[in-house]
Image (cartoon, rainbow, N blue to C red):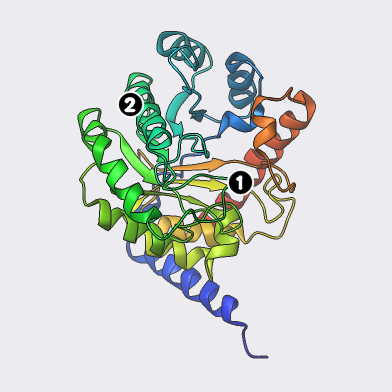
Amino acid sequence: MKRQTFESKNDRIRQAFIALKKSRPQKLKDRLNLSWSNWGFGMESLADSARRLSRNGIRFIELHGNHYGADLGYKPAETLEILCDHDIQVGGVCGMFSAENDLSSNSGLTRQAALDYLKRTIPFTAEVGGSYLLVVPGAVGRAKAYDSSEFARSVESLRLVADLFVQHNIRAAVEPIRAAEVSFCHTVADAKSYIDAVAHPGVQHINGDVYHMQVGESHIGTAILQAGRQLTNLHVADSNRCALGDGALDLDTLIMALYLVGYNQPGCYVTPEPLGPGGDPYPAMFGQPNPALLDRLVRRTASYFHEREDQVRAL
């Protein structure tokens, strides 16, 4: 039987991975860095979240970018103390961009809110030892375009604060998101075009998300190869946006592709973000968490990821 198109792409990635392991085994010496994005934990205390991650062998965290105003958000010293108590380091910060702080908005006040948000969040990311800050070019949750100038306004806006990324040694990680949630920048190719348009050394990296990639890309593995060394964080969940192992995601091919781009190095993270199959996960951001459900999500995801990574490395 002739192989399906996606199977042929899988085969090519598998063959390239086996060839890499044979010719340059040192490239597989280090394992991938497993992190966790905690904004899906809702109102749970950071101490409780850190305790859960530590209990499941996760040593990195992507913090909720919750500095929505001068009085809001994690405090650096307190955050570091809590994470140190549980032997966890900050991988990066998940920047949150809505219609209220939209880099691409046709409202100057809204664009200024996005700039002020970045001015608060970039220094915080550096203070807690993070290496990247996720940036979404347009508002999440607004799929309808304002007009034909969104891209240009977003580029212009981000340039105004791009020097701060260099100053604080933080990677701006541009995230492509599915068309049902944002009006532009849906694929790795779109993110690369946006980065090229910003044309600034502080804005050179990509945050991938396999949930969005399943919709926007023809093949997740080849999209990872296309992102290459620009990829600095990858949000993962299974095909149903639940715990890894609960759906039909081809995790093995994803892991092989990551090794092929040299992703097993400091500053690069595989970050689960299993937000569930519902249409809009954002109300849970400030909702009461279900500890038993979160325990299961983390335990299942971490164990399954390590199991599949072991299997791939043993090929």
Q: Is residue 21 visible?
A: no
Q: Secondary structure at mark 2?
A: helix
Horizontal side of residue 21 vs 35, given as left or right? left
Q: Is residue 31 visible?
A: yes
Q: Amino acid at mark 2?
A: Lys
Q: Secondary structure at mark 1?
A: helix
Residue under circle 2? Answer: 119
Residue found 72% across the figure and 30% down from its top: 294
Instruction: Work out whether residue 218 or residue 140 is closer to the camera in this orientation and state it.
Output: 140
User: In the drawing, what numbered circle is on residue 123?
Assistant: none
Residue under circle 1? Answer: 305
Give coordinates of residue 245: x percent, y percent: 71, 50
Extreme residue in the bottom direction: 1
Q: Callout 2: few (<14), some (14-19), or many (20+) C-alpha neighbours within 10 Å?
A: some
Q: Comparing marks 2 and 1, which lies closer to the viewer?
A: 2
Q: Quadrant of residue 103?
A: top left
Give coordinates of residue 57: x percent, y percent: 58, 29
Q: Quadrant of residue 16?
A: bottom left
Q: Amino acid at mark 1?
A: Phe
The N terminus lies in quadrant: bottom right
Mark with earlier residue (2, 1): 2
Give coordinates of residue 40: x percent, y percent: 64, 33
Name above or below for residue 38 compared with residue 15: above
Horizontal side of residue 241 vs 119, given as left or right? right
